[in-house]
Each structure stands twice: as C-alpha cells, then as structure tokens.
Amino acid sequence: MKASRALSSLLLTAALAAPALADGPAIGAPAPTFQLTTIEGKSFSLADAEKANKAVVLMFIATKCPVSNAYNDRMRDIANEYGKKGILFVGINSNNTEPESEVKSHAKEHGFAFTLVKDPGNKVADLYNAQHTPEIFIVGPDGKLLYHGRIDENQQEPAKVSSPDLKNALNEILAGQPIAKAETKAFGCSIKRV
C-alpha cells in the first residue's frame, strides 16, 4: 500500500512537471545538452560539438516512417553539402520500435555519413519535445537554439520544393545573418516513445 501510494505520488509529480517541458526550448534559449553514444560506439557530446562547429543540426529521424524515408536523400545531400562548410549534422533515432541494428543497416543502405545516435528511453526527444520524424533543431556555437521545424514543405516531390526552410536557415547562419523564418511546422510520423 505504501509503495503504491509512493508510486502514485511520483507519477503525479512527474505529470505536474511535464507541462514545463511540453513546449521544448524556445528560439534563442539555451538548447538542452546531452551525451549519447554513436552507432559506431563513439561518445557524442552536444556541448563539445557546439563549440567545434559553426552550428549543429539535430535531425530526429526514423527507419520505418515513410515521411522520414522520403527525406533520406535530401538529409544525406544537405549534410554532405553543409558539412563541408563547418555545419555538423546529427541524426537522432528516438523510436523505441527501431533497434540500433536496424538504425545501422538503414544508415548504410541510404549512405548516411553524418553522425547517428540512438536515443534510449527518448530522453533527448523529451528534452526537445520532438514529436515527429523528421524534425529539425539547429543549435549555434553559443549553445542557443536557432531553428526548429521542417526540412522543407514538400515530402513527395523534391523538385517542386518552394520553401527549403532548413537550407535557408543554414545559408543565413553561414552569412552571419539572423534566421528570417526560425520556426516552421514539422510534420511526419510520431516518435514512438517508451
């Protein structure tokens, strides 16, 4: 009985605390730092990556989501193009239904050369309140959130993209300009949480 009451109290405390994180970090606010292990077994620290790059692009992605998969080529190509300009790309798989072995084979199949991490227990997704795959967050070298949203508005036809939001944000960062459209609406499959 005591254990049950203690658990109920803990759950209630967690539920009351949840709304404070519900929105995730705001544009211009400090981005939550984290440390995870890459699928190659190396340690990845966002705090270290921020300082070593012009920006860090966090991409919440999936192996089974058709929307995320529709962007595989674009994610790979944008990461290759802007990686040469000092922007680090990090793919984060937070889906509890997609094991690390599947994430590795998916990355190999699609030629992902960017850093890729598995987010056990959705801890990083929860810190950012990431809801979709794909969903993008850009963190500046000062640790502040610069952009949150989508890659672009057209998942089905890359040739017909009229609003390349991620590329626009990256170009503005590289030009030393403020991001004109720092928030866009991310869309895709829901992150499969524990």
Image (cartoon, rainbow, N blue to C red):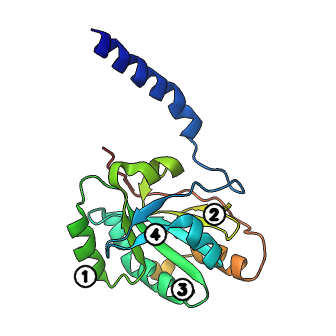
- Amino acid bearing label 2: Tyr
In depth, the one of 118 and 95 nearer the eye is 118
Q: Along the horizontal axis of the image, is 54 left or right of 93?
A: right
- Residue that numbered label 4 is attached to: 44
Where in the figure is residue 11, as x and y percent of width and height? 40, 24
The local crowd at label 4, few if under 14, some if 14 to 19, many if 20 or more residues have their Cα within 10 Å, is some
Q: Earlier in the sequence, mark 1 or mark 3?
A: 3
Placement of the C terminus among the 4 image quadrants: top left
Secondary structure found at label 1: helix
- Residue that numbered label 3 is attached to: 83
Distance between the Cα atoms at labels 3 and 2? 17 Å
**159 w.r.t. 65: above or below:** below
Q: Quadrant of residue 189?
A: bottom left
Distance between the Cα atoms at labels 4 and 2? 21 Å
The local crowd at label 2, few if under 14, some if 14 to 19, many if 20 or more residues have their Cα within 10 Å, is many
- Residue that numbered label 2 is attached to: 147
- Amino acid bearing label 3: Gly
Where in the figure is residue 157, as x and y percent of width and height? 42, 76
Distance between the Cα atoms at labels 1 and 4? 23 Å
Q: Earlier in the sequence, mark 1 or mark 4?
A: 4
- Residue that numbered label 1 is attached to: 109
For image coordinates 74% across by 67% down, the residue present is 180
Where in the figure is residue 8, as x and y percent of width and height? 37, 17
Secondary structure found at label 2: strand
In depth, the one of 43 and 74 nearer the eye is 43
The local crowd at label 1, few if under 14, some if 14 to 19, many if 20 or more residues have their Cα within 10 Å, is few
Please identify, in this view, whether the residue under mark 1 or under mark 4 is nearer the observer: 4
Mark linked to residue 130: none
Q: Quadrant of residue 88?
A: bottom right
